[in-house]
């Protein structure tokens, strides 16, 4: 009583009795509880046990009163959805959207302020978003959303003596999302990017992220009290987190939940929380494979700038186009073709022209030759973070590409975090974060502008993926993590376990243009003391199945593929568009096993399956039940696996290939060397 009287004396308005509402997933295994005790909060249970303890909701604003204490549950509405929708391209053609919904209205009786929170519970997790309808502008200074991990207090353990642990990269750092993933006890985490993957003391796997990030700041997470993670929004250059008219919906805050690590990969939660396609007919968005004048620059064989080693020349591009056409690739990416690359291009983004080529790059002759041989030029726009310079040119740039028959463009935003250069309406230079509200809009505006010219966008140095490829299917891929190029010059290069980390972290957000397929591991020498792929040859093949992207690059130099035609055959065969995908097994950071069925398109029958598996620094022998194959059919398993003596440091090239007839119910024994992998094509007979 004394506590209540004290709070009332301070002006707080408390409900006489706290209300609790409950929402269950369709299968009943996940429960969300919403409560208005002191401050609106929610909690999540899985199999009847708490995984997210009572976690606060609300906002602080720059001028308006906060959405904190004194808000009561006024009313609620419920709904159910069970629908199936089709992706124009993707890791699966058909996606089932089955969820239960609870929309809760909170009102402060004293101030008359109010807002809604819409919760959706799926069998693979939950999502919730704020819906605010104010008559006056509201600038957000802080979002108060918490994610309180159950049994994560400092030193807390399960009955088996386990502690909660996490796999993460730092949030709001100079290198954006391009960090090596760390695996630590949860208590050692500070500020992190999402997707943020963790394992509770009870062994439940969670991944916290967001969906449908539009006109809002990206969310990082910061651990305040032990186990309590609070949303940290990336601010504008003036310090405001989010600027709104007062009528806004936030992105969905998402929590994927699974008993096993593979269950996180098999979730479609992020896509299901995005709006349907807004572009209409997108038959012009074409998945496929490409090669490029790219890797040579990273290993210092060529340069982006002009000179004797310039890579983007007419003659060199024609050679690549011929190689692409002869080997079934759709296009050739060419970087360094336009004016602006000479000198310190990293810091001179204002000098880029997106319509003027170097004198030794004849874009018309190149695209004409591409039509003749049957492979397209893939465009490239590097901004070096000078986005105002890019915006004023991108209409002309996309018009040029459309005229030349270019239908895909890779964009780049190389700049340190917090150093995006924009010119405001008064001509003043401002510096923004890649994942602040301004750049969230800038990236999306670029994708929309490209769509008007039937051009797809592959964004590097991007805003993180939040499933907007469903709404804007021409946003065909992104980078957003350490890619293959770090194996050329990164110090250190990507570690052996990097792919087994990406599969359960970054890849939960959406497709990544990792650029796999390096066949020459020794450009800097073998061993573990040089910058090189910490990978066997078989693992490079497996990446085409393990790491999903609708556009996959064969990243190495053409001559290196011609030296190893046996391994190159798998890259030529593997599709990039899938009817179905299944994570079969794995542990975060240790190993992953993926099976995917091809989607019927062009040269693909739609009957074949592909399998990819990768491991960390530990060799593994795995036995797989082929239960994913269709009954009553026979398949020729074309196997590409590490040889008996293979390992990534000194013997990366030893590759065993073989064939055997298999069917559903059979078991397949496969060997993965240290730092290795296996790739299998199951060709329908």
Image: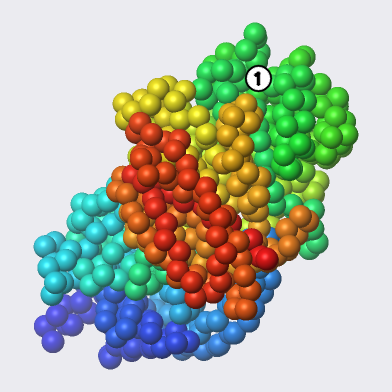
622 or 447: nearer the eye? 622
In this rendering, is residue 582 above or below 440? below
**Residue lying farthest to the top in this orientation:** 308
Q: State the colouring used for the structure image.
A: rainbow
The residue at 56%/17% (across/down) is 301
374 or 101: nearer the eye? 374
Where is residue 411 drawn, in percent x and y?
63, 38
Where is residue 626 drawn, in percent x and y?
50, 70
The residue under label 1 is 311
Task: Check the picture and name the quadrant holding the C terminus.
Answer: bottom right
The residue at 61%/66% (across/down) is 635
In the image, is 267 to the left or to the right of 71? Answer: right
In the image, is 618 to the left or to the right of 583? Answer: left
In this rendering, is residue 456 above or below 682? above
User: Is residue 57 at all visible to an observer of this figure?
Assistant: no
Tell me the quarter of the picture where residue 328 sits: top right
User: Is residue 308 at all visible to an observer of this figure?
Assistant: yes
Where is residue 406 drawn, in percent x and y?
79, 39
The residue at 22%/63% (across/down) is 164
Q: How many marks overall?
A: 1
Task: Check the picture and name the quadrant holding the N terminus.
Answer: bottom left
Where is residue 112 drawn, in percent x and y?
44, 78
In this rendering, is residue 415 above or below 592? above
């Amino acid at each position: 009583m004394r506590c209540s009287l004290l709070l009332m004396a301070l002006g707080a308005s408390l409900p006489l009795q706290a209300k609790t509402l409950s929402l269950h997933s369709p299968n009943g295994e996940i429960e969300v509880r919403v409560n208005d005790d002191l401050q609106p909060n929610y909690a999540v249970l899985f199999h009847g046990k708490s995984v997210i303890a009572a976690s606060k909701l609300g906002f602080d604003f720059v001028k308006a009163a906060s959405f904190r204490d004194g808000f009561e549950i006024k009313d609620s509405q419920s709904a159910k959805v069970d629908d199936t929708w089709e992706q124009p391209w993707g890791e699966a053609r058909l996606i089932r959207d089955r969820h239960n919904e609870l929309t809760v209205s909170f009102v402060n009786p004293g101030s008359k302020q109010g807002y809604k929170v819409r919760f959706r519970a799926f069998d693979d997790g939950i999502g919730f978003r704020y819906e605010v309808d104010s008559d006056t502008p509201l600038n957000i200074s802080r979002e108060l959303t918490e994610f309180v991990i159950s049994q994560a207090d400092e030193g807390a353990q399960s009955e088996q003596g386990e502690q909660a642990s996490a796999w993460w990269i730092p949030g709001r750092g100079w290198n954006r999302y391009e960090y090596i993933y760390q695996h630590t006890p949860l208590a050692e985490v500070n500020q992190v990017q999402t997707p943020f993957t963790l394992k509770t003391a009870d062994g439940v796997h969670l991944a916290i992220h967001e969906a449908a990030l539009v006109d809002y700041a990206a969310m990082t997470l910061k651990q305040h009290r032990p186990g309590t993670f609070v949303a940290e929004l990336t601010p504008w250059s003036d310090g405001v987190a989010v600027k709104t008219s007062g009528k806004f919906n936030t992105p969905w805050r998402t929590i994927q939940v699974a008993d096993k690590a593979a269950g996180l990969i098999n979730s479609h939660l992020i896509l299901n929380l995005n709006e349907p396609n807004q572009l209409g007919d997108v038959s012009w968005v074409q998945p496929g494979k490409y090669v490029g004048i790219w890797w040579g620059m990273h290993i210092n064989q060529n340069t982006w700038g002009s000179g004797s080693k310039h890579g983007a020349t007419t003659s060199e591009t024609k050679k690549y186009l011929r190689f692409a056409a002869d080997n079934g690739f759709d296009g050739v990416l060419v970087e360094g073709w336009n004016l602006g690359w000479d000198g310190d291009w990293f810091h001179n983004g204002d000098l880029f022209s997106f319509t003027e080529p170097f004198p030794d790059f004849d874009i018309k002759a190149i695209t004409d030759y591409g039509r003749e041989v049957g492979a397209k030029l893939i465009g490239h726009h590097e901004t070096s973070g000078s986005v105002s310079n890019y915006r004023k040119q991108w209409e002309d740039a996309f018009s040029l590409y459309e005229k030349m028959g270019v239908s895909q463009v890779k964009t780049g935003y190389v700049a340190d975090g917090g150093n995006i250069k924009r010119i405001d309406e008064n001509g003043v230079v401002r510096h923004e974060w890649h994942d602040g509200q301004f750049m969230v809009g800038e990236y999306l505006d670029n994708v929309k502008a490209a769509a008007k010219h039937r051009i797809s966008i592959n964004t590097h140095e991007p805003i993180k993926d939040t499933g907007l490829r469903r709404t804007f299917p021409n946003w065909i891929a992104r980078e957003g993590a350490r890619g293959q190029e770090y194996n050329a010059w990164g110090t250190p290069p990507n570690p052996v376990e990097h792919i087994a980390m990406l599969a359960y972290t970054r890849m939960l957000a959406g497709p990544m243009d990792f650029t796999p397929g390096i066949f020459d591991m020794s450009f800097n020498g073998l061993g573990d003391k040089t910058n090189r792929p910490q990978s066997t040859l078989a693992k490079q093949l497996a990446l085409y199945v393990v790491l999903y992207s609708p556009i996959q690059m064969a990243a190495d130099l053409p001559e290196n593929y011609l030296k190893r035609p046996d391994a190159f055959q798998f890259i030529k065969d593997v599709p990039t568009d899938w009817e179905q995908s299944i994570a079969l097994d794995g542990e975060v950071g240790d190993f992953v096993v993926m099976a995917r069925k091809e989607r019927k398109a062009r040269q693909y029958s739609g009957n074949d399956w592909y399998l990819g598996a990768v491991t960390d620094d530990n060799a593994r022998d795995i036995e797989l039940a082929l239960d994913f194959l269709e009954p009553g059919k026979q398949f020729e398993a074309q196997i590409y696996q590490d040889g008996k003596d293979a390992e990534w440091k000194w013997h990366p090239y030893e590759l065993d290939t073989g064939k055997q007839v298999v069917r559903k119910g059979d078991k397949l024994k496969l060997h993965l060397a240290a730092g290795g992998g296996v790739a299998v094509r199951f060709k329908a007979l």
